[in-house]
Amino acid sequence: MGECTHDPGRRRFLAGIAALAGGCADRAGEPAGLRFWAMGREGEVARELLADFERANPDIRLDIQGLPWTAAHEKLLTAFAGDVTPDVCQLGNTWIPEFAALDALEPLDARLAASPAIARDDYFPGIWETNVVDGRLFGVPWYVDTRVLFYRRDLLAAAGFSQPPRDWAEWRRAMAAVKRRAGEGNFAILLPLNEYGPLLALALQQDEALLREGGRWGNFRGEGFRRALGFYLELFESGLAPPANDTQIANLWDEFARGHFSFYISGPWNIGEFKRRLPERLQDAWMTAPLPGPAGPGASIAGGSSLAVFRRSRHKDAAWRLVEYLSRPETQRRFHALTGNLPPRRAAWAGTLADDAHARAFRDQLERARPLPRVPEWERIATEMRLVTERVVLGDLPAGRAPAEIDARVDRLLEKRRWMLARGPR
């Protein structure tokens, strides 16, 4: 039997709990209140982006909340603990495994199979795989991120290279030639020690996984990571890269403009920054290129954000309609125009974006983007990899000891995962 609610104070209390639980007290005949959380710039443009969706779906009332990236992860965990998660949320795709492990997300495989709007084969494969955990789909890519080379093509041409390098051997020769011309105090490439992205991209180009036995143990002592680490460290040892973090570079764009370095590994957000911050005389002097690999065009990081439906949502059908709308190629093109974010669907690249010379390298690279290990601990693992590598570059740890040191730190981070997996299904 239900509890008595005749007491007015108790009724107000229960009504407040219902409101906190996500608007579950929608009145009959009223539009379903659908809560959508988005981060950063995406949260700022969501209302404009979704105006047509609201007009076409009068039975849905959107409650859009923008969150700063710096607070989003903690707020989501707090919402999960308090059972007040949103219906639909933007999640960085490295967060998908964590919230899937918490059983916070709705599996989407059945809805995808019945959807005429979302074509699985139209998505870049590495990006799609970031949303698959233990064989089940928990998110749909919303925008993509990967890493490519930003380079000074005028300085590369002056050093004798008419095209960007395609493999490691050619890249070494190009960097050595650029460094010789740059002279004392200048370098070929900037690899900030407080960023793990460049080394991670090189490691993803190897045939061996970074974790072994289903993500139970580190595999940084494997030949693949040792090869990537050796190439990376050689760039510092030979003076091609400065042993500095990005806070020690006065102004990245000014230093790139004056030729302090000619190569830089970065993501799509820097297309707009380079266009805005480099002087007009250098706008034709820089370009982007896919990352060189050990023996030809190489892989890179599959990053970005996805759209996830929370398991406790009371409006899953409406939530899926929102995901489908945001996944349309024409919506993704509008989203790119508002934010500069790159679309995850090949069909969305038609038109203006396909003609953007600086974005073309990203389109190429996305076909060879590889997902990161899909374990909740991944971001902490990547941080430990960076910290150990920084010690090697600064001379505080012998290079030969680095792989074992990273593995030891990673194995400690994965201890709880091994324990949980040993217990079997919940």
Image: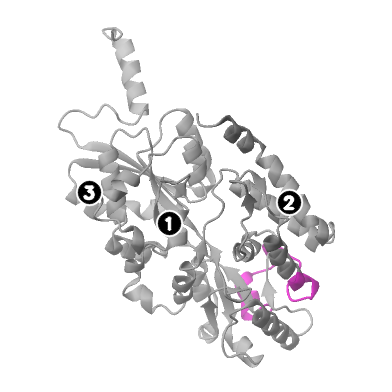
User: Can you say whether 324 is above or below 359 in the image?
Assistant: above
What residue span does the magenta drawing correspond to? 234-261
Quadrant of residue 63 within the rendered picture: top left
Q: Earlier in the sequence, mark 2 or mark 3?
A: 3
Rendering coords of residue 189 (x, y %):
68, 75
Residue occupying the point 63% across, 33% down: 419
In the rendered image, the vertical position of residue 201 relative to residue 316, given as above or below: below
Disc on the earlier residue, 1 or 2? 1
What is the crowding at mark 2: few (fewer than 14 residues within 10 Å), some, or many (at least 20)?
Answer: many
Whether residues under marks 1 and 3 lie with C-beta atoms below 8 angstroms apart, the answer is no
Q: Secondary structure at mark 2?
A: helix
Query: How many angstroms separate mark 1 from mark 2 (CA)?
Result: 28 Å
Cα distance between the residues tagged 1 and 3: 27 Å
Residue 403: horizontal and vertical position, in percent? 75, 55
Residue ID for mark 2 = 406
The label on residue 54 is 3
